[in-house]
């Protein structure tokens, strides 16, 4: 099939999508210089005219005019799109929807809703782009954009807009909302590592579990350096197999880098109740624990523990 045939077939399936011409065997550049909200069409005659004007051109989908949002999960050249996707799936859950695999191994997830364009809008290496290449189009290396499923396009959930319209991400890596490594936060971290943190097991998502453990400590007011110390002492040896120091250091660094949805310490009771009377948060059954010769009480307050890992939505 020619690119024009593919584009016309796409319009028969999705008649409310608006397409526009792209360079031959490429995803860039758009061949019409004006705004895509104007220079796009769902009229087959217009697509045929563009194909005559730009022989064998590819076609893209203008998302704003089509009233679509696409989550573009980029895994090329080591980009952390998959990790960001997994974290968001853990926290929010991705609605099942139509999915297209890209030539570089990433994914486009299609949702119906008011479009918002934002680079890294969902987190590191997960964009909400202005346009995407129409599924079926090929690029120069012979690879193509191809459906992994043809589910109906789901409605964009509310949390999309909560993330995409933020002028400044609350979880800038440099932003800290509590004093780090306070004794009661360290005590909580030790208790979490000993009793609640999911252990890393080879072949069962161990790398992701370790990264989530680091994220939990970050959210609860633990510095990256202290997290490494605590995880080494109270968590790592129970993993199967334990990480070497270099590998563990990298996993913790990844967790601190990818946890970009709220500030450091944003999961602590101190942050949650910053404007409340401190007396409203009461210890429940303190226990003493010793860390490198220092003794701290393990404080179990009324704030919820970090949510447990749930089964991931399957991108494919």
Image (cartoon, grey):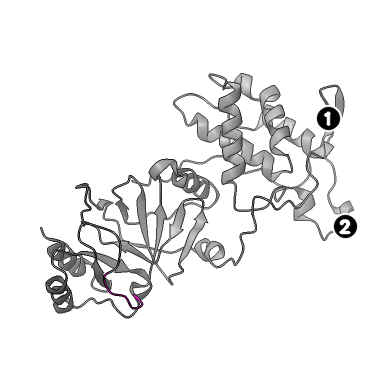
Query: SS for tag 1?
Result: strand
Q: Tell me the chief SS of the magenta region.
A: loop
| Residue stretch rendered in magenta on the structure | 31-36
The residue under the point 56% across, 45% down is 258
- Disc with the residue nearer the chain's start (2 vs 1): 2
| Residue 7 spot, x, y in % from top left | 18, 65
| Residue 230 spot, x, y in % from top left | 71, 28
User: Which residue carries the number 2 mark?
Assistant: 277
Q: Nearer the viewer, residue 251 or 11?
A: 251
| Residue 299 spot, x, y in % from top left | 81, 37
Is 232 on the left-hand or right-hand side of 50? right
What is the number of the mark on residue 254? none
Q: Nearer the viewer, residue 87 or 224?
A: 224
Q: Nearer the viewer, residue 234 or 84?
A: 84
Q: In which quarter of the image is the N terminus?
A: bottom left
Among the 4 quarters of the image, the one containing residue 223: top right
Among the 4 quarters of the image, the one containing residue 5: bottom left
| Residue 174 spot, x, y in % from top left | 68, 51
Is 245 on the left-hand or right-hand side of 208? right
Marks 2 and 1 sit apart, C-alpha to C-alpha, by 24 Å
The residue under the point 69% across, 27% down is 194
Question: Is 104 situated above or below 201?
Answer: below
User: Which residue carries the number 1 mark?
Assistant: 287
Q: Nearer the viewer, residue 167 or 70?
A: 167
């Amino acid at each position: 099939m020619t690119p024009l045939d593919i584009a016309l077939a796409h319009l028969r399936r999705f008649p409310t999508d608006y397409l526009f011409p792209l360079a031959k065997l490429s995803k860039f550049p758009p061949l019409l210089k004006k705004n895509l909200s104007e220079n796009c069409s769902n009229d087959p005659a217009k697509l045929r005219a563009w194909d005559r004007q730009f022989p064998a051109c590819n076609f893209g989908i203008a998302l704003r005019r089509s009233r679509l949002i696409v989550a573009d999960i980029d895994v090329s050249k080591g980009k952390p799109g998959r990790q960001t996707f997994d974290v968001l799936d853990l926290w929010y859950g991705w609605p099942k929807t139509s999915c297209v695999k890209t030539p570089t191994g990433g994914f486009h997830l299609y949702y119906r809703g008011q479009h918002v364009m934002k680079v890294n809008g969902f987190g590191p290496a997960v964009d909400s782009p202005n346009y995407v290449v129409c599924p079926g189009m090929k690029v120069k290396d012979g690879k193509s954009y191809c459906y992994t499923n043809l589910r109906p396009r789901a409605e964009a959930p509310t949390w999309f807009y909560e993330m995409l319209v933020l002028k400044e991400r609350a979880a800038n890596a440099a932003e800290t909302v509590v004093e780090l490594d306070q004794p009661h936060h360290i005590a909580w971290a030790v208790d979490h590592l000993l009793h609640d943190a999911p252990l890393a097991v080879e072949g069962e998502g161990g790398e992701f579990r370790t990264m989530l453990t680091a994220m939990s400590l970050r959210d609860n007011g633990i510095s990256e350096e202290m997290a490494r110390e605590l995880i080494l002492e109270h968590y790592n040896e129970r993993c199967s197999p334990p990480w070497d120091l270099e590998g563990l250091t990298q996993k913790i660094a990844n967790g601190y880098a990818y946890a970009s949805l709220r500030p450091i310490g944003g999961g602590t009771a101190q942050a949650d109740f910053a404007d409340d009377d401190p007396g409203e948060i009461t210890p429940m059954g303190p226990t003493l624990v010793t860390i490198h010769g220092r003794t701290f009480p393990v404080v179990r307050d009324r704030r919820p523990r970090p949510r447990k890992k749930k089964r991931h939505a399957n991108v494919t």
